[in-house]
Image (cartoon, coloured by chain):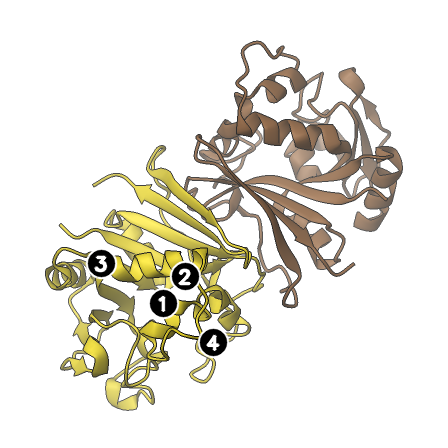
Chain colours: A brown, B yellow
Amino acid sequence: MARLIVDISVSLDGFVAGPNQTLEEPLGENGEMLHEWVVGTKQFQEAHGHGGEAGETGVDDDVGAEHLAGTGATIMGRHMFSGGEGPWEDDPKALGWWGDDPPFHHPVFVLTQHAREPVVMEGGTTFHFVTDGIESALEQARAAAGDQDVSLAGGGQVISQYLKAGLVDEMQLHVVPIFLGGGARLFDGHVAQPPGQLQLNRVVESPTGAVHLKYELGGR
Amino acid sequence: MARLIVDISVSLDGFVAGPNQTLEEPLGENGEMLHEWVVGTKQFQEAHGHGGEAGETGVDDDVGAEHLAGTGATIMGRHMFSGGEGPWEDDPKALGWWGDDPPFHHPVFVLTQHAREPVVMEGGTTFHFVTDGIESALEQARAAAGDQDVSLAGGGQVISQYLKAGLVDEMQLHVVPIFLGGGARLFDGHVAQPPGQLQLNRVVESPTGAVHLKYELGGR
């Protein structure tokens, strides 16, 4: 069965977005610095349709490419999809802020309280909207992922919900050497795990200063 | 001049002590798990007067021994010294909860609002009580440290004060693979650093699951 893998960039002080998130600045102040390690890589440039020629190879590229290659479906929260909230007709970014050719190239399941038909984008990305909870989203994502894994992309609240429910199999944190000083926390009031529930699987140190930490979660 | 080095164990969710800290359980619920990587090491057993025979060698021991050997003085908050607060005559742990032969073996400067004479312990540890602020404590600790560095042991609030003041030279975080789910945060509302202020210097991965991350801070 497809594993559920958290994969997210986090500041050294534990934030996955900076303070004062807006529709214009969905990652908050300085939040884009969280992703600097990845945007210059070959795999990222290719996934975003820019061609890979200008992209850099190296450990950051390897880590990103590995995750992308292993992923058959993605789950994300509504806020990560559009930055908006409430009924879709009131959301200025109702088609998402991922562009016409989103970087996923596989089915994406968006957790929301507001039902709507799937949105088919270019390049193999279709956004499905799930209104009946995290377990349903996981079930649908697993069915879509086939032999590959399901990526849990964020944000922090969605990740915490899956962690609390004991549904996460693996977690890869890209720890970026910045302080954001506020914003959206990755772990905010997560229920404590019993001892021995997290196992460090891999540490990759990058010249960019990012540290890629991979943990396996027990308990299932 | 002696550098100021933060050295602290932190859970994966960013806590340096668990929830519900009490005088009997100063590290909070499950907080002692933060230090399991170090308590079994040879250098820790020796520093605590238990002899080093039973202690384990390896990367955790190396990391701990390196820090101890480089440290000539330590700064800590009142809460880390005794767990108490208010006037000393009302503090049931007024001599600290570090025992008769504390593991420091050098001068320790305790930040407090309540003045008192130094407390001389066995083994070279003397606790000095500083009531005129973090800069004064650093100045006194530097004078005491001589050619060695000053260790900033905690807790989180004290570390944040020094970070905000731009006084920290280096930071070593021992990231332990547990969720505490609450308690005392290492970084709680720290002022964001401008870009490029943190440089990853070293990553050491331990078989215990701890990851020892060392960062250099700019700005001085």
Q: Nearer the viewer, mark 3 or mark 2?
A: 2
In this rendered view, identify the residue nearer to me: A62 or B173.
A62
Task: Give residue B43's mark.
Answer: 1
Q: Which residue is mark 4?
A: B21
Label 1 or label 3, whichever lies nearer to me, is 1
Q: Residue under label 2, please give it.
A: B61
Q: Mark 4: which amino acid?
A: Gln
The type of residue carrying mark 1 is: Gln
Residue at 39% of width from left, 43% of height from top?
B202
**Do marks 2 and 1 share a chain?**
yes
Chain letter of disc 1 in the image: B
Q: Position of residue A220 (x, y in %)?
A: 79, 58
Q: Earlier in the sequence, mark 2 or mark 4?
A: 4
Judging from the image, mark 2 belongs to the subunit labelled B
Residue A217 is left or right of residue A212, and the answer is right
Q: Residue sitting at 29 percent across and 89 percent down?
A: B90
- Provide the secondary structure element on which disc 1 rests: helix
Could you tell whether B172 is left or right of A7 in the image? left
Q: Pinpoint residue B8: horizontal percent, then vertical percent.
A: 39, 60
Label 2 neighbour load within 10 Å: few <14, some 14-19, many 20+:
many
Residue behind mark 3: B150
Measured Cα–Cα span from mark 3 to mark 2: 20 Å
